[in-house]
Image (cartoon, grey):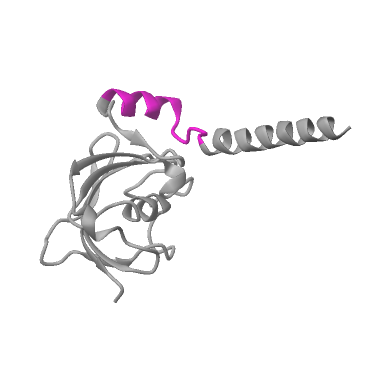
Amino acid sequence: MRTFRILALCGFALLAGSAVPLHAQRERLSPEDVEIVEKRWPKAKRTFTTLRYIILKEGDKQGGSPLPGMMISALYKGMLLNDTVFDSMLDPKNPLKIRVGRGNLVPGWDEALQKMHRGEKWLLIVPSELAYGSKGRPPDIPRNATLVFELELLDFSQD
């Protein structure tokens, strides 16, 4: 009886443990967008949320990464998959300054920024669920749009 109980618990643990990664790995891009992304950026890494990224410029790994609530300053250019630019802040004298991990950014940015290091530049491929979703941001961003960002983390602090 005891052996059966242990086997049953082990089997349940294996099933429960395997369900989490399978759920977390659900593809969030449409099949058409997956085809475009895999063709244009075949070396893009993928997080468990299916955010994809390429490190374009290495940063200072000694300084860590921003934590939720920290103020970041960043430069960015946002594009649709067809390379149409919908927004940008590229002037180092006037960067975007905002708190990370507070729901002020699209979820894909919150995730990426908390993995980035000071001075690092990433190309982000953000599924619509981690961006503006089914509402989009008319007129510039259509519904269910996969977005591409060049994102450079200049600095971060507790302030």
The span shown in magenta is 25-39
Q: Would you say residue 21 sits in the magenta stretch?
A: no
Q: Residue at x 47, y 36 (%)?
A: 28
Main SS type for the magenta part?
helix
Q: Residue at x 32, y 25 (%)?
A: 38
Classify residue 28 as left or right of residue 81: right
Horizontal and vertical percent position of residue 51:
39, 41
Q: Would you say residue 29 sits in the magenta stretch?
A: yes
Comparing 93 with 55, the one in front is 55
Q: Residue at x 47, y 49 (%)?
A: 135
Instruction: Give above or below for 152 relative to 73.
Output: above
State the quadrant of the C terminus.
bottom left
Horizontal and vertical percent position of residue 85:
22, 45
Classify residue 5 as left or right of residue 51: right
Horizontal and vertical percent position of residue 138:
37, 51
Query: Residue 62 is drawn in which quadrant?
Result: bottom left
Horizontal and vertical percent position of residue 2:
85, 35
Q: How many marks?
A: 0
Q: Residue at x 11, y 62 (%)?
A: 92
Q: Residue furthest front?
A: 2
Classify residue 109 as left or right of residue 85: right
